[in-house]
Amino acid sequence: MQMTPEQMWNERFKQPEYAYGEDPNEYLKEQLQKLKPGKILFPADGEGRNGVYAATLGWDVYSFDISEEGKKKALQLASKHKVSINYSTGNLPELDYQPGEFDAIVLIYSHFSPDIRPHFHKILNTLLKPGGTLIIEVFSKKNLEYAQRNPKVGGPKDLPTLFSLEEIERDFTGYDIEEFMEKEVHLSEGLYHNGTGCVIRFTGRKK
């Protein structure tokens, strides 16, 4: 019987090693250094490497994921760095976030299932306040070719769960775009993101 997404991620995150390492994503680091800390949301934050990093910079961090095992690891990492994060488990529509609540929202490899993704993205747009910053790094549809050559680079293995530039553009309208590109990158993130892959990066300020 096929595992549910919750079972799959709990299985991955219950291992002692951090699946994607303890260090934050490089694109996130680059973009956060340009911003004044405020209240920030990390959807699908997994084991917390990105949320915990933001907390070390003084951000008021809210994270969520469907994995209880991810939450445990994230809170351990936060404790190690002597910071606190607000971490919820569940799906976005069930969580009690308010419109305009966040100064920034960060989607790092947040590959929601295609059947719920447009709805989730619509909700996220409402949670970001006007003038707030949206930061995205996700695997491009082109990454499938890279992953076939080198499975260690990671990423979803089905085309609909990967992203095109057009899909990002469609789901996130109403932004002054500061950066938007499809790019080949070399990843070295823990056990599951290693090698050359293809990502889409987006940074925009909500109008």
Image (tube, grey):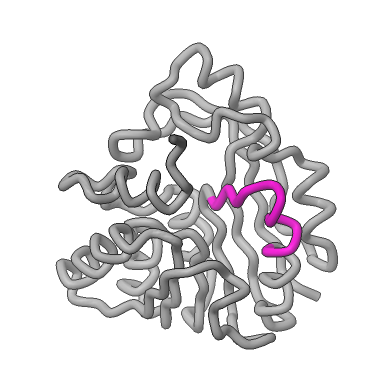
| Residue 115 image position (x, y, % from top left) | 71, 50
In this rendering, position of residue 84 left or right of residue 58: left
| Magenta-drawn segment | 110-120
- Residue 134 inside the magenta-drawn segment: no
In the displayed structure, 163 sits above or below 47; it is above
Which quadrant would residue 151 be assigned to in this image?
top left
In the displayed structure, 9 sits above or below 58; it is above
The residue at 22%/63% (across/down) is 77
Report the magenta stretch's main SS: loop
The residue at 64%/70% (across/down) is 133
Viewer-closest of 81 and 17:
17
| Residue 23 image position (x, y, % from top left) | 30, 51
In the displayed structure, 32 sits above or below 166; it is below
The residue at 37%/28% (across/down) is 194
Q: Seen from this angle, which residue lies furthest top?
A: 149
Which quadrant would residue 153 be assigned to in this image?
top left
In this rendering, position of residue 194 left or right of residue 18: right
In this rendering, position of residue 167 left or right of residue 83: right
Which quadrant would residue 103 be assigned to in this image?
bottom right
Viewer-closest of 176 and 80:
80
| Residue 26 image position (x, y, % from top left) | 43, 48
Viewer-closest of 207 and 193:
193
Which quarter of the figure is the C terminus placed in?
Answer: bottom right
| Residue 113 image position (x, y, % from top left) | 62, 48
Viewer-closest of 64 and 177:
64
Which quarter of the figure is the N terminus placed in?
Answer: top left
The residue at 20%/45% (across/down) is 15
Q: Seen from this angle, which residue lies furthest front?
A: 1
In the displayed structure, 63 sits above or below 148; it is below
